[in-house]
């Protein structure tokens, strides 16, 4: 096989690079804030996210071709077999990189990655589409804290915040694709709720996530953060009324960054 520059760029796009880097950066910052091995966490999370992103485009290739999703690399000429190989190689590399974190943290991270793969393989088209996001994001704080001496799990507020952020991310991510999903038979929870219901699901999940973090951060930081999160998400919804707009998803990333700031300011409380 002859590789060209364009093929490499398409493969990078197929891994869903912005959310992959965002999740990796959040996990790395969280690890640094609690004194965990940030580089080891970054490598494990990055490779796990790469495997999930590539698996998504590999498994969705037929649907994307059917609806002519010109924004998708497989529609632009990237062979699905190449994406499949990349996903499986990244998944294989994720196992030893996760176990470098220690047995408890590594096992938790592998469960989080397996949950995300379950979404790609089957659950994205069911009413349980939100569950892998809740599990994977909810486990991430404990993946980080379990690398510390004594291998503690994250407190309940940290786990709840992660799970709710995951549900919010799921809702916002599918909003631009509702029409294509309907055409190809993908009926996850947001698709079943319709655009208005999906927006409501996302907004409620994000507000509750910030409220959970505010519980850990205290009144001085928590209340202003909650108000700011509501403002940012409201702006995202206002801009994102156009069909296929990704503004709500961008707002999710901004709120996630805000929430990471809360976690960084309360690293010892999380651990």
Image (tube, rainbow, N blue to C red):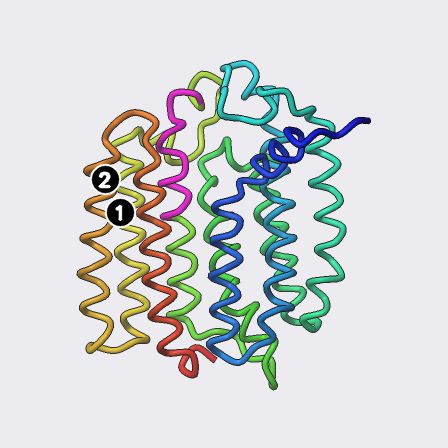
Q: Secondary structure at mark 1?
A: helix
Locate the N terminus and report the quarter of the image it occupies: top right
Tell me residue 16's x, y (percent): 53, 40
Q: Say which quarter of the image contains residue 105.
A: bottom right
Residue located 41% across and 69% down the image? 158
> Image check: 102 left or right of 21?
right
Residue 203, numbered label = 1
Name the foreground residue: 233 vs 214.
Answer: 233
Residue located 49% across and 55% down the image? 23
> Image check: 60 left or right of 226?
right
Residue located 58% across and 75% down the image? 146
Name the foreground residue: 162 vs 47.
Answer: 47
> Would you name the residue on which mark 2 appears?
237
Tell me residue 190's x, y (percent): 37, 35
As drawn, 217 above or below 66: below
As drawn, 200 above or below 224: above
């Amino acid at each position: 096989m002859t590789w060209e520059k364009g093929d490499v760029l398409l493969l990078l796009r197929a891994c869903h690079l912005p959310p992959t880097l965002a999740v990796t950066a959040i996990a790395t910052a969280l690890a640094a804030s609690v004194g965990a091995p940030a580089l080891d966490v970054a490598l494990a999370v990055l490779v796990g996210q790469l495997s999930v992103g590539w698996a998504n485009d590999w498994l969705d290739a037929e649907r994307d071709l059917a609806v002519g999703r010109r924004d998708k690399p497989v529609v632009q000429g990237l062979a699905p077999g190449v994406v499949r190989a990349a996903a499986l190689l990244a998944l294989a590399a994720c196992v030893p990189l996760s176990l470098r974190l220690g047995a408890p943290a590594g096992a938790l991270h592998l469960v989080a990655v397996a949950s995300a793969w379950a979404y790609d393989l089957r659950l994205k088209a069911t009413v349980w589409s939100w569950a892998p996001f809740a599990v994977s994001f909810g486990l991430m704080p404990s993946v980080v804290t379990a690398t510390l001496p004594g291998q503690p799990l994250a407190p309940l507020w940290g786990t709840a915040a992660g799970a709710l952020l995951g549900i919010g991310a799921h809702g916002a991510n599918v909003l631009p694709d509702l029409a294509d999903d309907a055409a190809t038979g993908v009926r996850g929870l947001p698709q079943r709720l319709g655009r208005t219901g999906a927006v409501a699901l996302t907004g409620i999940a994000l507000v509750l996530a910030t409220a959970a973090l505010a519980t850990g951060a205290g009144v001085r930081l928590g209340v202003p953060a909650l108000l700011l999160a509501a403002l940012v998400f409201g702006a995202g919804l206002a801009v994102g009324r156009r069909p296929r707009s990704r503004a709500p998803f961008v707002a999710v990333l901004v709120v996630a960054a805000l929430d990471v700031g809360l976690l960084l300011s309360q690293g010892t409380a999380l651990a």
